[in-house]
Amino acid sequence: MLAKYKLNEKLEFTVEGEGQKEIFKELASVQEIFGEEKCGLCSKSNIKFVVRNVEGNDFYEMRCTDCGGILSFGQHKKGGTLFPKRKDDNGEYLPNKGWHKWTKESSK
């Protein structure tokens, strides 16, 4: 079973699954990763996808071109899929839905 899903004016996806449950899972994944419509800091919609490579490691981010806000993505150990980092190391939700500004202190 195939389903087309238009996320916004810029992105359209085709997902595939055996039935409704599989299609639902695929759509949920697309929405979680690509559904961010505005910056969590300034609420502007000028966000872009960024992949940085540092010492052979890829870091996936969304970046606001207006205020410089960043939403970082982590990688699941199994499957290699991405997830938005919305919680801290203690499992507490971060402010601004995980959007933040880079500082030297935050990189430690």
Image (cartoon, helix red, strand yellow):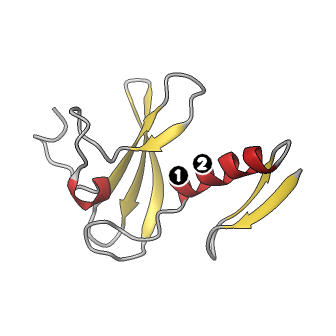
Q: Are marks 2 and 1 in contact (CB under 8 Å)?
A: yes
Q: Quadrant of residue 45?
A: bottom left
Is 54 displayed left or right of 93 in the figure? right
Q: Amino acid at mark 2?
A: Ser
Name the residue tied to disc 2: 29
Query: Residue 99's spot in the image, x, y percent?
Result: 29, 57
Residue 1's place in the image compared with 52, above or below, is below
| 94 in relation to 91, above or below | below
Q: Find residue 92 and report its horizontal and vertical position in percent.
A: 22, 42
Residue 104 picture location, percent across and down = 13, 42
Furthest-left residue in view? 105
What is the quadrant of the C terminus in the image? top left
User: Which structural element holds mark 2?
Assistant: helix
* Residues packed near mark 1 inside 10 Å, few (<14), some (14 to 19) or many (20 plus): some
Task: Please tell me whether residue 9 is drawn above or below residue 2 in the rendered image.
Answer: below
Name the residue at 57% across, 29% down. 80
Place residue 27 in its image quadrant. bottom right
Element under label 1? helix
Residue 61 rendering spot, x and y as whole percentages: 41, 49
**Identity of the residue drawn at 37% across and 24% down:** 55
Amino acid type at mark 1:
Ile
Of tags 2 and 1, which is closer to the observer? 2
Residue 26 placement, left or right of 57? right
Tell me the number on the disc at residue 17: none
Give the left or right position of residue 22, taking residue 87 as reference.
right
10 Å neighbourhood of mark 2: few (<14), some, or many (≥20)?
some
Residue at the spot of label 1: 33
Residue drawn 73% across and 64% down?
Answer: 5
Depth check, front residue: 63 or 2: 2
